[in-house]
């Protein structure tokens, strides 16, 4: 497998893993409401870290672009993918190193954002008291693994974007070959090799000899 293809696949795999982590539970909140009693709610990664879903989709777009762009474009995409991976790692890294913000959790639960449904109400009343908030390290670790994959893939793609396939420059190469054959015909019109090369490129090698013969007959 070509290194540039492997790098692109790493970016795509990283994006997929980050997306999977965004659907996992990142935070569990226990609260007490004097009207409804105790309640337990969970927040998935896409709710707790609203930007991680967008970054995962951006990494998927980078994966697709890395497969179709030329060498310079692939190098740029590699740099962009690495930066996206770093950005996507900030929220899960923060979750692993710090306690979750209880006030942020309350805001998400009382605003209706956490329900992720337009016709659903809030998951927590304004007067409810949060008694416990717990993070799920596994979800954050999964996200970090995805970010690491995308980061390594982006760096490798930027460092080794590969060379363009022969078809990428087919027209330019064919034009240069035709010019070389025309030059060879002028220098060695009787050369068998040059004639075969001209036939391969659909070049009429008889033009030069005919014009030469006509000139000789007129003289």
Image (tube, rainbow, N blue to C red):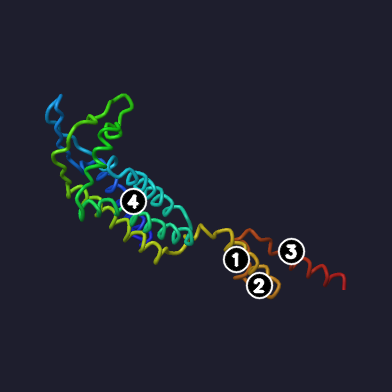
Which tag, 4 or 1, sits closer to the chain's start? Answer: 4
Residue 154 x %, y %: 36, 59
x, y percent for residue 199: 62, 61
Q: Residue 197 carries which label?
A: 1
Q: Which badge, 1 or 2, comes first in the chain's sequence?
A: 2
| Residue located beneath label 3 in the image | 207
Residue in the image at 15% along x and 24% along y: 35
From the image, tell me which residue sits under label 4.
Answer: 12
Q: Name the residue under label 2.
A: 184
* Along the viewing direction, whichever of 125 and 116 lies nearer the viewer: 125
* Residue 198 x, y percent position in the rendering: 63, 64
Residue situated in front as seen by the camera: 34 or 157: 34
For the residues bearing labels 2 and 3, Cβ distance under 8 angstroms = no
Circle 2 crowding by C-alpha within 10 Å: few under 14, some 14–19, many from 20: some
Residue 62: percent from the left, percent from the top? 40, 52
In the structure shown, which secondary structural element does the residue marked by tag 3 occupy? helix
Q: Which quarter of the picture shows residue 39?
A: top left
Q: Residue at x 29, y 41 (%)?
A: 46
């Amino acid at each position: 497998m070509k290194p540039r293809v492997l790098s692109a696949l790493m970016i795509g795999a990283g994006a997929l893993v980050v997306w999977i982590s965004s659907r996992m539970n990142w935070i569990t909140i226990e609260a007490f409401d004097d009207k409804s009693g105790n309640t337990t709610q969970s927040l998935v990664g896409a709710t707790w870290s609203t930007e991680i879903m967008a970054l995962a989709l951006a990494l998927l777009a980078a994966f697709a672009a890395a497969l179709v762009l030329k060498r310079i474009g692939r190098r740029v995409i590699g740099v962009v993918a690495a930066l996206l991976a770093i950005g996507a790692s900030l929220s899960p890294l923060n979750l692993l190193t710090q306690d979750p913000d209880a006030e942020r959790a309350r805001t998400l639960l009382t605003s209706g954002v956490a329900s992720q449904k337009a016709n659903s109400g809030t998951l927590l009343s304004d007067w409810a008291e949060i008694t416990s908030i717990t993070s799920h390290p596994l979800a954050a670790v999964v996200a970090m693994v995805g970010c690491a994959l995308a980061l390594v893939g982006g760096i490798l793609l930027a460092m080794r974007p590969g060379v363009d396939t022969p078809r990428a420059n087919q027209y330019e190469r064919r034009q240069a070959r035709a010019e070389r054959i025309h030059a060879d015909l002028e220098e060695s019109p009787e050369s068998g090799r040059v004639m075969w090369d001209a036939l391969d490129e659909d070049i009429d090698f008889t033009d030069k000899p005919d014009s030469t013969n006509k000139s000789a007959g007129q003289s």
